[in-house]
Amino acid sequence: MVDERIAIYPGSFDPLTLGHDDIVRRSLRLVDRVLVAIAATATHDKSATCPLERRVEITREVYADEPRVEVVSFNGLLVDFARESGARLIVRGLRAVSDFEYEFQMALMNRSLWPEIEVIFMAPSNQYTFLSSSLVREVARLGGDVSSFVPAAVLRELVKVYGDAVAGG
Ligand code: PNS
């Protein structure tokens, strides 16, 4: 497609939550394609609980029926990956003021590294403003029901790892 608008939605997605999914679907209203880009290196040192390749597989399952969403992993700098992918737009979700400082710093650093990149922040649906991957991981690890916080493919994986209780069973 000529002049196709591509947005990158980068993150750790460990795991992808319904809050992330909400941002992906909102982004699809603005652009032709969304690249969900799962980073091998996260800025805040987080030890991933799920291997990168598995996160890619599960997230691909989530978007199996959405041809305008592509799920990829990337190494190195996000802006380098964006340039190689033909994307000039980075999308990030902002849940609360507490997210702002970290997001603003990253946005300005990314733009210093590559002035042609634009970063937009999107507000998720109200019902997801409290959601985070780390809370979902913790609740699942402790056997709580996370079925209303993650897409079905992610829930299936969490059931495999933590047992039926995470699906409310
Ligand atoms: O979901 P997260 O963990 O908050 O996402 C952070 C992420 C992956 C977007 C950020 O750490 C990132 O862009 N990592 C790639 C390496 C990079 O470009 N670092 C410089 C960022 S200013």
Image (tube, grey):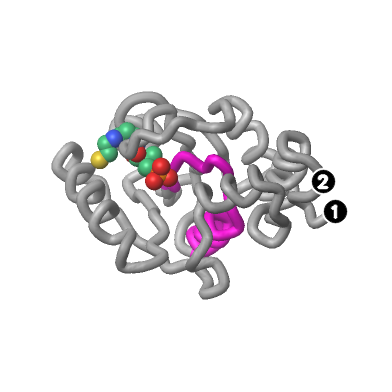
Q: Position of residue 128 (x, y in %)?
A: 54, 66
- Residue tagged 2: 164
Q: Residues within 10 Å of mark 2 (few under 14, many from 20)?
A: some
Quadrant of the image occupied by residue 157: top right
Sequence-wise, the earlier of marks 1 and 2 is 2
Q: Residues within 10 Å of mark 1 (few under 14, many from 20)?
A: few
Q: Position of residue 7 (x, y in %)?
A: 42, 49
Quadrant of the image occupied by residue 121: bottom left
Q: Residue at x 60, y 58 (%)?
A: 18
Closer to the camera, 80 or 84? 80
Q: Residue at x 52, y 60 (%)?
A: 131
In terms of image quarters, where does ligand 1 lie? top left
Question: Is the residue 2 above or below the residue 22 in the image?
Answer: above
Residue type for callout 1? Gly
- Tell me which segment is drawn in magenta: 8-29
SS label for mark 1: loop
Q: Position of residue 124 (x, y in %)?
A: 48, 67
Residue type for callout 2? Asp
Left or right, 158 with reference to 97: right
Query: Does ligand 1 reach within 8 Å of label 1's beta carbon?
Result: no
- Residue tagged 1: 169
Marks 1 and 2 close (CB-CB < 8 Å): yes
Left or right, 21 with reference to 73: right
